[in-house]
Image (spheres, grey):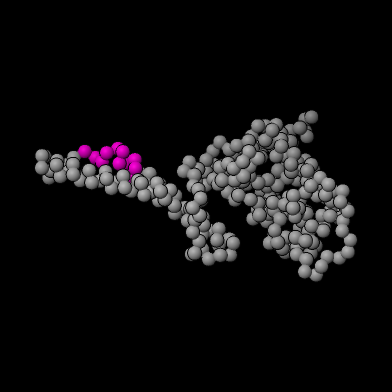
Amino acid sequence: MQEKEKQIKAEVKQWLEQAEAADAEEDVRHGKDLRGDELPEELQRRESRLKKIKEAKKAVEARAREKAKSEGADPKEAKPKDKDQYNFTDPESRIMKGSDGFVQAYNAQAVVEPELQLIVGQTVVDATNDKQQLMPMIGIMEEQSGQRPQEVLADSGYCSEKNLEELEASGKPEDRIIGYVATERQKHDDYRTPCPRGPLPKHATRVDRMKRKLQTKAGKAVYAARKTIVEPVFGQIKHARGFRQFLMRGIGKVRGEWALVCLTHNILKIYRLCFE
């Protein structure tokens, strides 16, 4: 964008100089009170594109400040990286890593209950990972389903010291949400590895304690249930119903599209429960 901005500015300057020369010639030929043709279409297109580039640069700079603020750095000192990108087709989407490489995308979120695989909380975010989504999704579930979970299973994408701390502070001891959050990507052999013996060191972090919790026999059994709760739902949506990409643009419309997909999933689940 920086290189293109310089190029377009030079082209606009050249067009303006030509326009001024043409105006002077027409004034001599037709008189100063008569108006010539409008700006050439090529110049209008370049001015419009230059305006969009300036708006894009401001948006990229704002993202850099937001990122710095979330990381505890000084937003005033934050500057975009040379390789930071902006999508003119759908500015609210982000570049994310998927199974097929890097794509322009949104991050679809869903909370699934364990009995019928119904989606009880859903939204779409523009965050490239799930680190900031654990507690917000619990709040969305309470808002959309009217219920507060007693236990939460989540994969390693939702694990952080802050998230585990917020789970511990989610209420009084008797009302606190019990979390089973993977601290790292689970390998197949991890379920057969015995739990280490002995107490954790005094300086152990919340992530360390959660890791030990999931290494216990009870912890392994609880977390293993996740593969029969959440993962099948996304598999059914993607593979059985063929929904693999959003058709709308803009996060507001995409959220509406995802809400319809989740609603359809629930209707089909309830239909099969009642009529099959």
**Residue lying furthest bottom:** 202
**Relative image position of residue 242 (x, y in whole percent):** 65, 32
**Residue lying furthest top:** 276
- In the image, taking residue 113 as reference, residue 123 lies left or right, namely left
Q: Which residues are magenta?
A: 37-47
- In the image, taking residue 223 as reference, residue 50 lies left or right, namely left
| 204 or 210: nearer the viewer | 204
Say if residue 171 shows up in the picture: no
Residue at 78% x, 54% y: name it: 180
Q: What kind of secondary structure does the magenta stretch mostly adopt? A: helix
| 82 or 274: nearer the viewer | 82
Say if residue 56 shows up in the picture: yes
Could you say which quadrant of the image residue 246 lies in?
top right
Residue at 79% x, 61% y: name it: 209
**Relative image position of residue 27 (x, y in whole percent):** 13, 43
**Relative image position of residue 77 (x, y in whole percent):** 49, 64
| 205 or 235: nearer the viewer | 205
Using the image, determine if residue 176 lies above or below residue 220.
below
**Relative image position of residue 81 (x, y in whole percent):** 50, 54
| 242 or 5: nearer the viewer | 5
Marks counted in the figure total 0
Could you say which quadrant of the image residue 165 lies in?
bottom right
Q: Quadrant of the C terminus?
A: top right
- In the image, taking residue 167 as reference, residue 189 lies left or right, namely right
Residue at 55% x, 62% y: name it: 69
